[in-house]
Image (spheres, grey):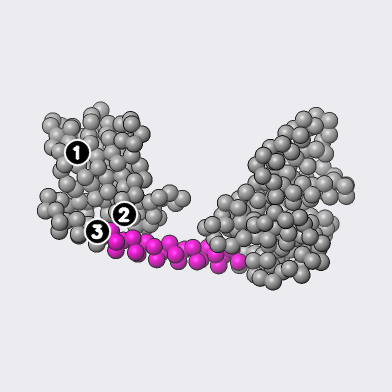
């Protein structure tokens, strides 16, 4: 169900009011998001109809039951879903029809949760009643073309993705400039900060003694990583347990910093974006595009 995957990645279901009369629902279509909600329901319904029909011949009663379950699942709390799903589990041995109803319940619930989870990111919401109306029309029909609807939904989602891309690009430029300004200010205030040819900046907080690791080494370290605004995004110190990893398995700036250190040394590393996570950052994480990273690293051992 490709459209299902696309829809989960774009919008969020809003509202849990009872399904209104079909004419009242259609009359409520006053915004672009309303139209998308209705069309989206129809598009997903046609994919769902093909999915369920592959499991066996469906009677009108079967289709109505599947449709009802798909729609009501989107309005359930996690507790209500678990209870209803458990009831179907208990009946599977008696009725093959239950399998389709349970599948509808699961799919409806998963789609609703997927929409819900993306509302904050996109700022858009699917109208639950209009989605339900579109789904019912699409699923209950024996022959329905949704080419127009799919084109509309695809265009709507493409516009959202383009806006997200533009925001990310603007953020990447801002982060890059902020990182350069931050490092320049730090270096002006502290002459002890040195730089390498690659652009890595570092300050020796504590000298070590003995051999240094090489690119094939495995090291044991305590570290804390933060953004230039002070946000800590990772810390073995907070976890209370040193980390062990291969020198070559971390971002280039971290690897280069480790190669400068002897056992027992403690450094502060200023890692520019090109030696960190680059233009993409860490999708879904705290590290944005072109973020400068600041690590305090203590080299405890070399293997």
**Which residue appears at 79% of the width and 66% of the height?**
24
Residue 39 can be seen, yes or no: yes
- The image shows residue 50 at horizontal and vertical percentages of 76, 50
Residue that carries the numbered disc 2 in the rendered image: 229
Is 270 placed left or right of 103 in the picture? left
Q: Residue furthest bottom?
A: 30
Residue 80, quarter of the rendered image: top right
Residues rendered magenta in the picture: 156-180
- The image shows residue 287 at horizontal and vertical percentages of 38, 51
Q: Residues within 10 Å of mark 1 (few under 14, many from 20)?
A: many
Number of numbered discs: 3
Q: Is residue 200 above or below residue 265?
A: below
Q: Distance between the residues labelled 1 and 3?
A: 21 Å
Is 211 placed left or right of 48 in the picture? left
Q: How far apart are marks 3 and 2 (CA)?
A: 10 Å
**Which residue appears at 61% of the width and 56% of the height?**
12
Residue that carries the numbered disc 3 in the rendered image: 182
- The image shows residue 137 at horizontal and vertical percentages of 80, 59
Q: Nearer the viewer, residue 289 or 33?
A: 33
Residue that carries the numbered disc 1 in the rendered image: 266
The mark nearer the N terminus, 2 or 1, is 2
């Amino acid at each position: 169900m490709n459209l299902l995957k696309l829809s989960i990645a774009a919008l969020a279901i809003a509202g849990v009011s009872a399904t209104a009369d079909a004419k009242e629902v259609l009359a409520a279509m006053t915004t672009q998001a309303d139209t998308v909600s209705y069309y989206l329901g129809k598009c997903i319904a046609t994919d769902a109809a093909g999915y369920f029909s592959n499991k066996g011949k469906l009677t009108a009663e079967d289709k109505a039951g599947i449709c009802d379950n798909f729609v009501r699942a989107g309005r359930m709390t996690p507790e209500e879903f678990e209870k209803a799903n458990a009831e179907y589990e208990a009946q599977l041995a008696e009725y093959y029809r239950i399998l389709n109803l349970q599948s509808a319940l699961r799919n409806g619930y998963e789609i609703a949760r997927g929409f819900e989870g993306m509302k904050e990111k996109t700022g858009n919401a699917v109208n639950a009643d209009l989605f339900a109306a579109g789904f019912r029309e699409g699923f209950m029909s024996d022959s329905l073309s949704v080419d127009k609807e799919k084109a509309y939904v695809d265009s709507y989602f493409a516009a959202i993705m383009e806006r997200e891309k533009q925001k990310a690009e603007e953020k990447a430029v801002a982060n890059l400039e902020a990182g350069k300004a931050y490092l320049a200010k730090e270096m002006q205030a502290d002459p002890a900060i040195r730089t390498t040819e690659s652009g890595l900046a570092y300050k020796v907080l504590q000298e070590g003694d003995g051999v240094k690791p090489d690119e094939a080494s495995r090291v044991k370290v305590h570290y804390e990583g933060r953004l230039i605004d002070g946000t800590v995004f990772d810390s073995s110190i907070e976890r209370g347990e040193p980390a062990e990893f291969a020198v070559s398995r971390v971002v280039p700036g971290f690897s280069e910093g480790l190669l400068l250190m002897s056992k027992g040394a403690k450094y502060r590393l200023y890692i520019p974006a090109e030696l960190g996570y680059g233009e993409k950052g860490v999708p879904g994480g705290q590290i944005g595009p072109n973020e400068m990273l600041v690590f305090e690293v203590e080299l405890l051992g070399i293997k």
